[in-house]
Amino acid sequence: MKFYTLLFSICFFNFCCNPPSEKINYSSPLETPVEKMKGISLVAPARPFTNNPMEPLNTIGVDWITVMPFAFSPVGEPQVHFNSSRQWWGERPEGVIETVRLAKESNIKVIIKPQVWMGNGWVGDMTFDKEEDWKKWESEYTDFIMTFAKVADSMDVEVLCIGTEFKLAVQEREEYWRGLIRAIKKVYDGKLTYASNWDEYPLVPFWDELDFVGVNTYFPLVESTTPTVEELKKAWQPILKKLRRFHQKTGKPIVFTEYGYMSIDGCAHKNWELEHKRTEIPVNQQAQANAIEAVFEVFWKEDWWGGGFLWKWYPNYQGEGQGRRAKFRAADYTPQGKMAEEVLKKWFLDESK
């Protein structure tokens, strides 16, 4: 099994500033800078690819992609539905396998990052009152994850993400998650991570069993319509310090398993409040480009930062076109055909960085 090596030391020491309630195995900071992942979160297509979607990614210097199979858990019900014929092709095992194959042929490394969608809810709020409901949900989620752990191992996928943004569940059900990690390691020998929400990463109790800390970094930064790069860099400073301290506590590299901004006014603040009305807000490519530029200017020089995965990229997307879908994408997170794409090219293709 060939897999991407994240360099870090394992010398443990006592870190005096740790609150006693935190369950973290402390170790020394990295002695060697980690390689930056120049990543993109690839949207799972509804149907098989018409052209090789990796070619445009090679052009802008992308060397990692996130492949995202999906499952569905109805709100309040202990069920995990996946691999349904009603799902998009790219969300099912057959689509994942083909996407990984094409990435490998294009010298692009892969994180398989299974995700659970809850319709009108959010997985971060998911909890159950009855133990029997937890057990049922966990059994079905295990089937979901193990399906893709086996795919990942069979295709030499470099990293598997064990879950995404289960804010309450990872705190309430620590033993389940530790057991799941042990089960995964029996069938998959690549690297493991978990994609925590931006306000969740300090609460995850099992970082000690994973290879790096994954953070979906949708931190609210600046509320203005078009914040400058300098304003954004200033807003990042307290967050940067907290992430650096967290790295020092865990001894783990930190990767932005998701980061990104819509190309609309005010995109660097509370994006989750803007998403449902994105097509009603003026398009603002400069705001999106500034926000992405600031991420790189702040974090690229940090030895412990392992890069990240921009949310998101539509495979075989040829431009804005016309109609409702074009209006949506013009305001959406994708950098395709926008100023933000040039920002990515500048950082991803410059070998001096």
Image (tube, rainbow, N blue to C red):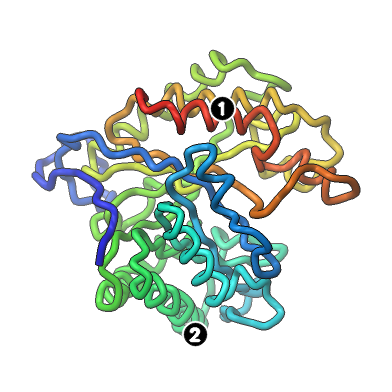
Q: Quadrant of the C terminus?
A: top left
CA gap, disc 2 and disc 1: 45 Å
**Count of picture labels:** 2
Residue 351: percent from left, percent from top: 37, 28
Residue annotated with mark 2: 136
The quadrant where residue 173 appears: bottom left
Residue 177: percent from left, percent from top: 35, 69
Residue 238: percent from left, percent from top: 42, 24
Is residue 264 visible to us here? yes
* Disc ID at residue 343: 1
Q: Quadrant of the N terminus?
A: bottom left
Tag in front: 2 or 1: 1
In the image, residue 45 sits, relative to residue 89, either above or below, namely above
Neighbours of disc 1 within 10 Å: few (<14), some (14-19), many (20+)? some
Q: Identify residue type, mark 1.
A: Val
Name the residue: 45% across, 52% down.
196
In the image, residue 101 sits, relative to residue 335, either above or below, namely below
SS label for mark 1: helix
Q: Identify residue type, mark 2.
A: Lys
SS label for mark 2: helix
Is residue 199 visible to us here? no
